[in-house]
Each structure stands twice: as C-alpha cells, then as structure tokens.
Amino acid sequence: MDDILFRHTAIATPNDKSEQFLSRATESDCAKKLIDESKAFDKLLKNSLQIEVPDDLTDKIMLEQSFALERDKNMSARWHVAIAASIAFVIGLSLPMLNSLTEHSGPSDIGTIALQHVQQEYFLTAKANENATLQTVNAKLAVYGGTAESGLGEVMFVNYCSFEGTSALHMIFKGEKGRVTVFVVPEGGNFTPSAEFSNKHLKGISEQVGKASVVIVGEPDEPLEMMKEKINKSIKWDI
C-alpha cells in the first residue's frame, strides 16, 4: 500500500481491518498518529450528531403544521374580502354596506383574541429565549402598575404588543409542559371577560386585576392554575 492510498484510507476509514492497512500503520509513528487523529475526529463527529430528541417533538411539529394551515385559511379569507372590496368599489356599493362584510358585532371576547394572538405569533416566539432578567421584566411591567419579585420563574420573552389595538404586555414563561403566554391587558379595550376558554390547540384562563386583565394561555396539558398562582404570589399590582 503506497503513501497516498494509506493516507486516504486512514482519513476516510481509520478503523479499516485489511492486512495491508494494518501492516502499513505499524511502520512509523507518523502513520499511527494519523490514524489516531482520524479516529478521534470520527468520534467527535459521531457525538456531535447524537442530538437528543425531545419526547414531544412530534406534537410540536403537528401543532406548527396546524397553525400554518389555519394561517393560510385566514390569509385566504382576507384575500376574498379584498376581492369583495374591489368589486364593491367597481359597482359602487356604499361604504356602510362594505363595512358590514368585516365588522364585528359588539365587544371582542378577550379569550378569543388571546388564542388568536398566540397562534399568529407562534412562529416568531416558539423558539425565542431572551432569558429575561427580573430587572427587564419590571422595566416593562411598571407601565401596567406591576412589580415582580423573585419566584416568577424563567421568563423567555417579554415585550409590548398590540392586543386587538390595545397596548398590552406579552410575556412567555417556561411552564411545566411547554411555553405559557401571559398577557397583561389594561382596561379600555372594550373586551368581554372570559374566565376560561379554549380551542382545539390551546386553552386559557383570565382574571381581572385592578384595572387590567391577566390572560394566561398554554397547551391543553399545561397546568395553567399553577402559573396563575405563581404570578399572583410573585407580582404585586398597583392598578
């Protein structure tokens, strides 16, 4: 076995058991060193590829696919409304008649809005992890009259959001089973209260705290009452 073939074999298949390769490997320290380095690299590569797969990976993928399908349906519905608006403009329908295609009757249910919000932003927040500090949380929570203390848990995301046109606080916590979304929605949004709510993907609970509503949303197997209790113990409200 010549040098070129030996080096190629040592790099590509350092565990080769052929007689020629093994004989060539014992001829010099350089040959043995090359084989040892190749074996070490193979071991490192093998360990790098052995990624632990979460038990709920299948459920997460199916959930993302379901949200994607519903998002496509919503986009299709908006497209149809846009077409209707164009046709209405062409044939001269009055604005009040056109508005009747899209207007909601009465106040929006706060639970329904929360579920829609979580699903619409799922692809943006599902993998976010800011490791928000207590100081960061309090800086944003102060706007709504709240002060968080120790024991709040791991906050993976915290920022302001538009909750159906109302400026609200959007937080994501690490829950017992998965991610838990918490909204702090101030009064003035004209929302219908909803103590408990759910759809086929998510569930939620909410309660009035002073002049704001705390809305908690998670997956069906998430113990939301535990998160509610943790929030009530850790956050002091001046609202």
Image (cartoon, grey):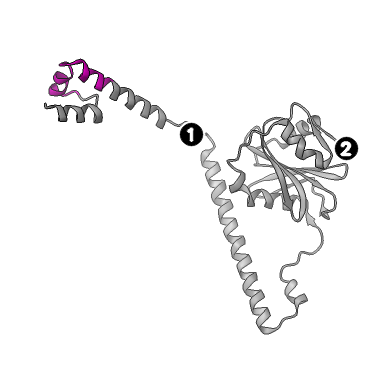
How far apart are the alpha carbons under marks 1 and 2?
A: 44 Å
The correct choice, above or below, for 167 with respect to 232 in the image is below
Q: Tell me the number on the disc at residue 238.
A: 2
Number of the front mark, 1 or 2: 2
Which residue is found at the position 69% from the left and 35% from the top?
A: 223
Q: Is residue 20 magenta?
A: yes
Residue 114 location (% of width, % of height): 72, 49
Q: Which residue is mark 1?
A: 53
Decide which of tag 1 and tag 2 comes sooner along the chain.
1
Callout 1: SS: loop
The correct choice, above or below, for 189 with respect to 235 in the image is below
Q: How many marks?
A: 2
Mark 2, other Cα within 10 Å: few <14 / some 14–19 / many ≥20? few
Q: Is residue 18 magenta?
A: yes
| Amino acid type of the residue that numbered disc 1 sits on in the rendered structure | Val
Residue 135 location (% of width, % of height): 74, 32
Q: Which residues are magenta?
A: 17-36
Residue 113 location (% of width, % of height): 73, 53
Callout 2: SS: loop
